Image: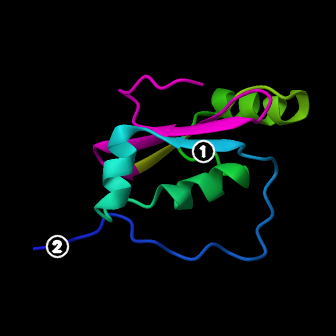
Amino acid sequence: MSFKLFPRQRTEPDSIPLFSSGALTLSARVQWLDSTGLVDPHRFLHRHLRGDWGDLDDTERRANDAALRSEGVLTSRYQVTPRLFLLVTTNANHSQTVIQLPEENGPL
């Protein structure tokens, strides 16, 4: 039996990124989810780059909005399933973005 949590989808051509992702790094677990076709991390990257911060509280959203103006760290959190979240984090100078699971500690 085969199933997909989030199959690959085309991104909207008119969606303009608010900032650059820099080099993209996928954690080992996210690479596995991508390679098995269970999750398309690029879908969440595109949301992140457009300023859709996902499942953040108001304080975290305001921090991201301020970081856009002052070149701070940008973090998004997306609920993929009831028990699976993805974190997308872009460093302050926008030279690197990491997509990982919350329990992973990736470099940034």
Q: Amino acid at mark 2?
A: Ser
Q: Residue 37: within the magenta? A: no
Label 2: few (<14), some (14–19) or many (≥20) C-alpha neighbours in 10 Å: few
- On the picture, is 79 further left or further right than 45? left
Kindly identify the residue that appears in the image at 44 percent across and 43 percent down. 86
Q: Position of residue 101 (x, y in %)?
A: 39, 36
From the image, tell me which residue sits under label 2.
Answer: 2
Say left or right for 77 vs 35. right
Residue in the image at 63% along x and 39% along y: 97
Q: Magenta segment, which residues?
A: 80-108
Mark 1 or 2: the one toward you: 1
Q: Image check: 20 left or right of 103? A: right
Q: Where's the C terminus, which quadrant?
A: top right
Q: Quadrant of residue 6?
A: bottom left
Image-quadrant location for residue 58 = top right
Q: CA distance from mark 1 to mark 2?
A: 28 Å
Q: Is residue 27 above or below residue 35?
A: above
